[in-house]
Amino acid sequence: VSRLEQLAGKYGVTIKFCPKFHCELNCIEGLWCSQKIYARRKTDQTYNAMLKLIVESRENFRDKEIHLKLLRRFWKCLLAYRDDQSYAE
């Protein structure tokens, strides 16, 4: 148990570690990617606009149900790796 896990346990928090270098297996990466694309397309490069776009990008992610696409991709990757295939295959 790492010191980080000990500290988290002290506060009743559980830490889940994701595999390193496997962004296709980490759905939060897809959320961040979606938010960055949304913000880049709509920004006027001001701080206030970015604060607004952060909220809007989350709403866009939810409204367009992008999480479903990411979960499908996640399961495709798991099945591919199980069958000794690469992500590209």
Image (spheres, rainbow, N blue to C red):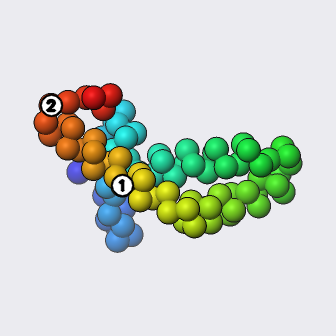
Residue 4 seen in render = no
Q: 57 and 20: which one is in front?
A: 57
Q: 9 and 34: which one is in front?
A: 34
Relative side of 67 to 7, left or right: right
**Is the residue 72 above or below the residue 11 in the image?**
above
Other residues around mark 2 within 10 Å, as few (<14) / some (14–19) / many (≥20): few
Q: Quadrant of the C terminus?
A: top left
Outermost residue, left direction? 83
* Amino acid at pointer 1: Leu
Rendered image: mark on residue 25: none
Q: Residue at x 34, y 52 (%)?
A: 72
Query: CA gap, disc 1 to disc 2?
Result: 20 Å
Q: Residue at x 13, y 36 (%)?
A: 83
* Amino acid at pointer 2: Asp
Relative side of 71 to 53, left or right: left
Q: Which type of secondary structure does the marked residue at label 2 adopt?
A: loop
| x then y, percent, for residue 70 | 41, 51
Q: 7 and 27: which one is in front?
A: 27
Rendered image: mark on residue 84: 2
- Residue hosting label 1: 71
Mark earlier in primary sequence (1, 2): 1
| x then y, percent, for residue 81 | 20, 36
Relative side of 79 to 25, left or right: left
**Is the residue 16 above or below the residue 63 in the image?**
above
